[in-house]
Image (cartoon, helix red, strand yellow):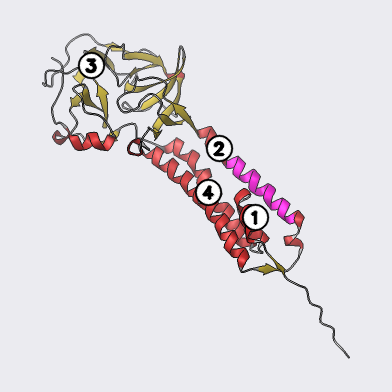
């Protein structure tokens, strides 16, 4: 008896089409080439960093939140591009049999799942972070007018002193640095802050530190140390002697905290705000006009020691 063996012609895949499919819908180009498991893995690899980014807002402290969020966003971008490139070369050496999993309906379903998943993860990220353009010179010299900042929308509790926050002011959103907690008593003298009877440590940056921060040296450039955070301020020069503060001080009041500008020249730079006016915590500078200032944190974390002091600058 004669046996008739039926054959099905394999269909070649278009590399350009495969690349475009994965560019617009991560993993769809791999599905188009018959690699369903590969498609699912690439989609999950793109989603994972996007889903983890919002978690940084809950756990972020100091300068770490900026680098973690940017690194995860970079990983998601890298997977997105790699999936398109992979699909292109995969299609050049693959041909597939027709079938239900490679039908138009299957492609549309995968595309819808990919779109909904990425959109959902992106929405979670947008709910946790937002960009903010610095509108004035109040935070010079570290944060300058026009800098694009990464702001965490989630403020679980009052950020530690030294942190930079965004708050609702009389004329819109503004930035400032947390000077002290609500329980502390604060006094201002010249360009100096005395917290609970002790002046905050102040000194002069070394040349290497100035270059690393992208700052311009000047007679008005000093650093201040508050709760382990070291950051530059524009301040008037002092006598160079560390002292206790013996004058009158004040508390912020119930539900309020002290905030201060880094630019302390010719302005009212110390004030109190309501805690419920806080709308975010600044994680750092996304773009500051130069590569050196890109991804700059809001302060430099340090160990408090004598080596941190080049010249102490405390007003008598």
210 within the magenta span:
no
**N-term mark: 4 or 2:** 4
The quadrant of the image that shows the N terminus is bottom right
> Mark 2 — residue?
124
Magenta stretch: dominant secondary structure: helix
**N-term mark: 4 or 1:** 1
Q: Residues within 10 Å of mark 1 (few under 14, many from 20)?
A: many
> Which one is in front, 122 or 279?
122
> Which one is in front, 188 or 105?
105
Q: Secondary structure at mark 4?
A: helix
In the rendered structure, the answer to whether residue 31 lies left or right of residue 242 reads right
Residue in view at x 48 percent, y 40 percent: 55
The furthest residue to the right: 1
Distance from the alpha carbon under mark 4 to that under mark 1: 17 Å
Q: Which residues are magenta?
A: 106-121
Distance from the alpha carbon under mark 1 to that under mark 3: 60 Å
**N-term mark: 2 or 3:** 2
In which quarter of the view is residue 84 placed? bottom right
> Mark 3 — residue?
191
Q: Secondary structure at mark 1?
A: helix
Distance from the alpha carbon under mark 4 to that under mark 3: 46 Å
Q: Which mark is residue 28?
A: 1
**N-term mark: 2 or 1:** 1
> Mark 4 — residue?
48
x then y, percent, for residue 73: 48, 44
| Contact, mark 1 vs mark 3 (Cβ under 8 Å) | no
| Contact, mark 2 vs mark 3 (Cβ under 8 Å) | no
The quadrant of the image that shows the C terminus is top left
x then y, percent, for residue 241: 10, 21
120 within the magenta span:
yes
Q: Secondary structure at mark 2?
A: helix
């Amino acid at each position: 008896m004669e046996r008739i063996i039926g054959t099905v012609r394999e269909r070649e895949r278009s590399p350009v089409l495969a690349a475009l499919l994965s560019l617009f819908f991560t993993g769809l180009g791999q599905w188009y080439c018959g690699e369903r498991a590969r498609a699912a893995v690439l989609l999950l690899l793109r989603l994972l960093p996007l889903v983890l980014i919002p978690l940084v807002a809950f756990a972020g402290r100091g300068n770490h939140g900026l680098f973690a969020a940017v690194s995860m966003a970079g990983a998601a971008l890298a997977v997105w591009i790699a999936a398109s490139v992979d699909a292109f070369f995969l299609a050049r050496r693959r041909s597939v049999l027709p079938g239900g999993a490679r039908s138009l309906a299957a492609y549309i379903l995968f595309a819808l799942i990919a779109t909904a998943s990425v959109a959902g993860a992106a929405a979670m990220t947008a709910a946790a972070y937002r960009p903010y353009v610095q509108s004035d010179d109040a935070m010079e010299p570290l944060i300058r007018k026009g800098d694009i900042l990464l702001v965490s929308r989630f403020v679980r509790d009052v950020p530690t002193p030294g942190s930079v926050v965004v708050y609702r002011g009389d004329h819109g959103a503004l930035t400032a640095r947390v000077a002290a907690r609500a329980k502390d008593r604060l006094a201002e003298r010249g360009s100096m802050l005395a917290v609970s009877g002790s002046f905050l440590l102040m000194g002069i940056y070394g040349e290497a530190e100035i270059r690393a921060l992208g700052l311009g040296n000047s007679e008005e450039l000093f650093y201040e140390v508050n709760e382990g955070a070291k950051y530059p301020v524009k301040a008037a020069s002092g006598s160079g002697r560390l002292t206790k503060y013996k004058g009158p001080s004040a508390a912020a009041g119930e539900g309020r905290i002290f905030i201060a500008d880094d630019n302390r020249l010719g302005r009212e730079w110390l004030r109190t705000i309501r805690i419920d006016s806080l709308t975010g915590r600044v994680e750092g500078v996304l773009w500051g006009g130069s590569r050196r200032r890109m991804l700059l944190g809001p302060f430099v974390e340090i160990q408090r020691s004598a080596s941190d002091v080049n010249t102490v600058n405390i007003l008598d």
